[in-house]
């Protein structure tokens, strides 16, 4: 089974991701509506985490009972709204986005969702916004420009609660991390980031081959 045009390439056997989605709790209507609009009005719908990874993020937030969640890279808001479903009472998400059009879509869908008032979309360069935020955060999801992953990681780690977790997306980069001679700048940045994290004695990590790869990180 081939991947739909709006899906991130998967490294799993053909049909496995579709099977996994079919055996994962379905996305609620507000996420389905957001996904449909994203496919219709953007040229990069494959950037959405989708129902499988969205379900994983929501499960992690719920298991951690994360009261404060930080997302670096909103896109159109699918991952933020997916995580919002896992929030405990009183929990909140701050999500950072550079693109005004993407932020507008995200804010509109947040307002129409059951989580209006619990998800705040902040517009601007993420590193600048991060400098203004007070921690700690119980869960941080990083899914933004790959060249700045190392900087986002350091900023997130500095604001992480003692039992907090960082999740980083796209750490397999469609398998290009295996191609040492790849000329893709993002692939090089991801390889360097992965090598940095696994060698960082402050943390422990596990790289999951879910969709395009998700690394979970916590302090030792």
Image (spheres, rainbow, N blue to C red):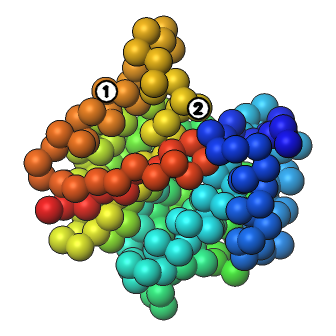
Q: Which of the 4 image quarters holds residue 70?
A: bottom left
Above or below, 65 relative to 4: below
Q: CA distance from mark 2 to mark 1?
A: 16 Å
Is 195 in front, or is 65?
Answer: 195
- Image coords of residue 82 (percent x, y): 62, 68
- Image coords of residue 15 (percent x, y): 79, 50
Nearer the observer, disc 2 or disc 1?
2
Above or below, 148 relative to 157: above
Q: Which mark is residue 5?
A: none
Mark closest to the chain's N terminus, 2 or 1? 2
In the picture, the quarter occupied by the C terminus is bottom left
Residue neighbourhood size for the residue with mark 2, other residues' Cα within 10 Å, grouped as few (<14), some (14–19), many (≥20): some
Q: Is residue 185 visible in this depiction of the protein?
A: no
In the picture, the quarter occupied by the N terminus is top right
**Residue wearing tag 1:** 192
Q: Which mark is residue 174?
A: 2
Is 125 in front, or is 178?
Answer: 178
Q: Is residue 173 visible in this depiction of the protein?
A: yes
């Amino acid at each position: 089974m081939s991947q739909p045009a709006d899906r991130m390439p998967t490294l799993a056997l053909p049909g496995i991701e579709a099977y996994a989605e079919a055996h994962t709790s379905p996305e609620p209507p507000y996420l389905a509506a957001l996904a449909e609009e994203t496919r219709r009005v953007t040229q990069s719908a494959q950037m959405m985490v989708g129902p499988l990874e969205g379900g994983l993020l929501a499960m992690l937030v719920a298991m951690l009972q994360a009261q404060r969640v930080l997302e670096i890279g909103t896109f159109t808001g699918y991952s933020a709204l997916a995580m919002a479903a896992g929030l405990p009472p009183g929990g909140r998400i701050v999500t950072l986005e550079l693109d005004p059009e993407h932020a507008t879509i995200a804010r509109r869908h947040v307002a129409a969702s059951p989580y209006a008032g619990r998800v705040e979309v902040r517009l601007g360069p993420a590193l600048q916004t991060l400098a203004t935020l007070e921690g700690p955060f119980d869960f941080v999801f990083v899914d933004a420009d790959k060249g700045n992953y190392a900087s986002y990681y350091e900023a997130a780690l500095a604001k992480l609660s003692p039992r907090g977790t960082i999740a980083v997306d796209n750490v397999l980069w469609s398998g290009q991390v295996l191609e040492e001679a790849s000329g893709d700048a993002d692939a090089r940045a991801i390889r360097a980031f992965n090598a940095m994290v696994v060698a960082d004695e402050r943390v422990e990590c596990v790289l999951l081959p879910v969709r395009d790869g998700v690394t979970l990180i916590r302090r030792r």
